[in-house]
Image (cartoon, rainbow, N blue to C red):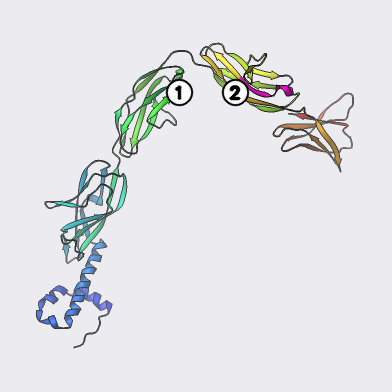
Amino acid sequence: MRFRSLPPVVLSLLLQLLPVVRVVAADAALAAAPILAVLRLIAGATAVAGSLHAVSGASITVTQPPNIQVTRTNGVASSFRVNLTYSDGRTVLTPQLYTAENLPPGFDQPSRSGGIWRITGNPTQSGVFEDVRLTGWKTATADPEFSATVLLKIIVVDRAPIISTQPTNLTAEVGSSATLRVVATGGNLTYQWRKGDLQLTGETSDQLTFDPVTSENAGTYQVFVQNSGGGILSNPATLTVTGGTEKPTFTTVPQGKTVHAGENVSLISAATGPGPLNFRWFRANEPVGGGTSEQLSFLPITLGDAGSYTVAVTGAGGTTTSEPAQLTVAAPLSIAAITVEGAQVRIVYNGIAGRQYQLEGTSGLIDLEWLPLVQGIVASEGMFTSPLEESSVKMYRVRVL
């Protein structure tokens, strides 16, 4: 008798319908027959098909862990049971061996104690691990003849914070520095300091520093320490402020500027603080004659007044000095040229970039009545253009605004 190769469809039907192993074992007398090779081929194919079917998970039942998910704490030794069964309608798999892939760092391979399988360990990395592959094997030797695989989800959370050193009460003098500190354990800690019920913006480290201390800093402080495992609020700590009076504080500081010689110019400052406040202006660290008020005026300013100016304000708590303000003095404002171009008059002047000027004109020679013509902010050069009117303006001037 001759045997032809079986088509794939026929082979698949044989895998589903024939009790292959029994046929092979039923009659040893067929050992020399050509049909035996076919049956052995079918038996091998049956084992592979069963394994692939198990991986699909269509009939896998997981009883441990519940919901195929566990949550454990980073740094805490723990374990959880694993148990699954598989049935394809004919064969029930009760695993004799479990293996796992992609376990979170710190977990060990499944181990058996009596009839119970567990995964144990001390996790060392927080996170969500969704690709843990748990495989149950039919035999204790991980024989690939038959197995079933499922995906586990293991969540490792941080250990809840523990405050080992609480912030302590402090007493500090005005003008000194002071720091409240907290020491806590736990992974991935965040901090938020608060004064009373008010969270302090930007104060998110393990210490809160006051430098310098002011009377407004007096009060009671706490810090909330948190991570994915929970949060804890520290004990309250009180900062008591003592000592002298505070130094003055500037509310307006003098600003540098560039001006023309001949302008009326003022540098302005303002400050707050206890007691009467006294102001003293300096140019290049040298006192300015008459500069003893909040405002330093030049009526008018000259080229020789250019320089770097500061103002010091003194009160009951001491003296505070402003940052330098640079005063630059350019040549007096003047018109460099007037030209007529068609129906336009072109006026060129020595304007300062960024400042605003106004072109004005008058037709009188005795009783001058200056009328505004054009306004503009100087970019790279000072220049105005104005229509050449029949009423004919006799004179022009440029004025800084």
Asked which quadrant contains residue 401, the reply is top right
Where residue 351 is drawn, which disc sits there?
none
Q: Is residue 294 visible?
A: no
- SS for callout 1: loop
Is residue 299 rendered magenta in the image? yes
Residue 230 position by quadrant: top left
Q: How many marks?
A: 2
Q: Nearer the viewer, residue 108 or 236?
A: 108
Q: Residue at x 83, y 35 (%)?
A: 337
Residue type marked 1: Asp
Mark 2: amino acid? Val
Q: Which residue is mark 1?
A: 211
Horizontal and vertical percent for residue 360?
81, 31
Q: Is residue 103 above or below residue 4?
A: above
Front disc: 1 or 2: 1
Q: Position of residue 134 (x, y in %)?
A: 24, 56
Specify whether 107 is left or right of 395: left
The boundaries of the magenta stretch are 298-310
| As drawn, 77 above or below 194 | below
Disc 1 crowd, CA 10 A, few/some/many (<14, 14-19, 20+): few
Task: Please determine whether, in this image, residue 115 is positioned above or below residue 283.
Answer: below
- Name the residue carrying label 2: 253
